[in-house]
Image (spheres, rainbow, N blue to C red):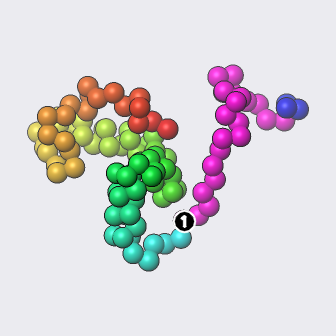
Amino acid sequence: MSGIIKLPPDLDQETLTDAEYFGPKMPSADPLKEGRANIEAIAAGLKSSQQAIREGVRNPDATQEQIDQWERDAKAKGLHFSTMPQGTDPALMDNSATSG
């Protein structure tokens, strides 16, 4: 590299060409079908949750952090929602496998 771009010192240079680009997302003609298709593809192992989130032009790490924070706040207030697994303490969960 010619020094035009300063790379972070902790950057794994083997990953420089691993970037994926998703252009602006077109509005879905049927968001319910698209959501169900994503759920089925994830369950079948055809795509990851992170991939589905990125295809929606969102950051999977930020999404995970928002979910974790929501569940911690809800638990602290004694609230439970159908999207929260019963008996799961978000503070004890290992989220390292879900980032990225």
Image coordinates of residue 18 in percent, x first then y, are 66, 41
Left or right of 70? Residue 45 is: right
In the image shown, does 58 or 100 lie closer to the viewer?
A: 100
Image coordinates of residue 80 in percent, x first then y, are 14, 45
- Quadrant, the N terminus: top right
Amino acid type indicated by mark 1: Lys
Q: Is residue 77 visible?
A: no
Q: Residues within 10 Å of mark 1 (few under 14, many from 20)?
A: few
**Within the image, what quadrant is residue 24 found in?**
bottom right
Dominant SS type (magenta): loop
Q: Which residues are magenta?
A: 4-25
Q: Residue furthest top?
A: 9
Element type where label 1 sits in the image: loop
In the image shown, does 85 or 42 lie closer to the viewer?
A: 42
Q: Residue at x 40, y 67 (%)?
A: 34
Q: Which residue is mark 1?
A: 25
Q: Is residue 10 above or below residue 18?
A: above
Q: Residue furthest right?
A: 2
Residue 64 among those drawn in magenta: no
Q: Is residue 25 above or below residue 17?
A: below
Q: Residue furthest bottom?
A: 29
